[in-house]
Amino acid sequence: DLTNDVEFVAGDLGSGEGIGAGTDGAEIIIHLAGSQKGDDDKARHLVEAAGTEARHLVFISVVGADRIPLESAIDRAMFGYFGAKRGAEQVVAGSGLPWTTLRATQFHDLLHTTAETMSKLPVMPAPAHFRFQPVDSGEVADRLVQLAFAGPAGLVPDFGGPEILDAKDTWTKVEIRKQYKSLVKDLHPDMNGGDRSDEDRLQEVVWAWDQIKDSRSFKD
C-alpha cells in the first residue's frame, strides 16, 4: 500500500496557516490548487512557506491565462478563473525558486459537469462559436509528474486533448448520456417493482449504449 509511505498534512493556502508543515523538507512541490479569485495570494503563501529549500516548484495553469481579456465586470465574472491563474503564474515566476508552469486545456470532467448542470434547464443552450479542446485529467497528471522529475523548465508548451470540439458536440454527448440513464431507470426491473416485461427493450438500450460509448467519436 503506497499510502503507508505518504504523510498527509492539512493547510490553508488562503490564509497561509499550516502550509509550512507540508513544505518543510520538500525538494519538489507541485501546486495544484485553484479558484475563481485569490490564486495569486495562495501561490504567494506557498512560496513563502517553501523558503529556499525547494529545488523545483511545478504549477498547473490554464491555456489562455495570458490572453483572455478581463476589462469589464462581465469579463471578470465569466473568466475570473483565467485572471486568477495568470496572477499565480506571475507569483511563481517571480518567486526566486526554480520553476515550471504547465498550461492545460479544460478537463473532460469539468465540461461534463457544466453541461449536466445546464441540461436541467427547460432548453439547453449551446453557445455559438464556443470551442473546447478537452483533455483527460489523468494524462495531465502524468505530464506533471514527468515535468517534476525532469527539472525546472520555465513555461513549457501547452497541453491539450487530441480534438477541438464546439459546444454543440460536447452538449450533445451529455444529452445522450442523460437519455440513456433515464431509459435504464424506466425499464430496469429493480426500478419497477420486479416487473420484467421490458427486459428485452432494456437489453437493446444497453447494447446500443455500449456501441455508442465505445466509439472513438464519443470518447474524444
Image (cartoon, rainbow, N blue to C red):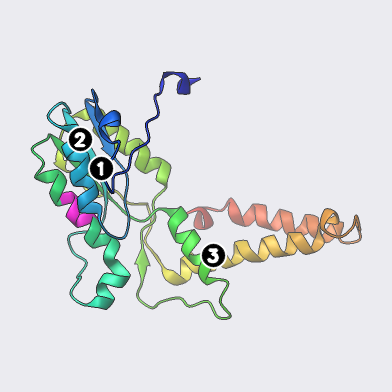
**Is the Cβ of the residue at disc 1 closer than 8 Å to that at disc 2?**
yes
User: In the rendered image, which quarter is residue 97 located in?
Assistant: top left
| Position in image of residue 80 (x %, y %) | 27, 65
Residue at which label 3 appears? 116
Of callouts 1 and 2, the N-terminal one? 1
Q: Amino acid at mark 3?
A: Glu
For the record, the magenta segment spans 85-89
Q: The residue tagged with tag 2: helix, strand or loop?
A: helix
Prevalent SS, magenta region: helix
Q: Amino acid at mark 1?
A: Gly
Of callouts 2 and 3, the N-terminal one? 2
Q: Nearer the viewer, residue 220 or 54?
A: 54
**Is the Cβ of the residue at disc 2 closer than 8 Å to that at disc 3?**
no
Above or below — where is 147 with respect to 205?
A: above
**Label 3 to label 1, Cα distance in Å?**
35 Å
Residue at which label 1 appears? 16
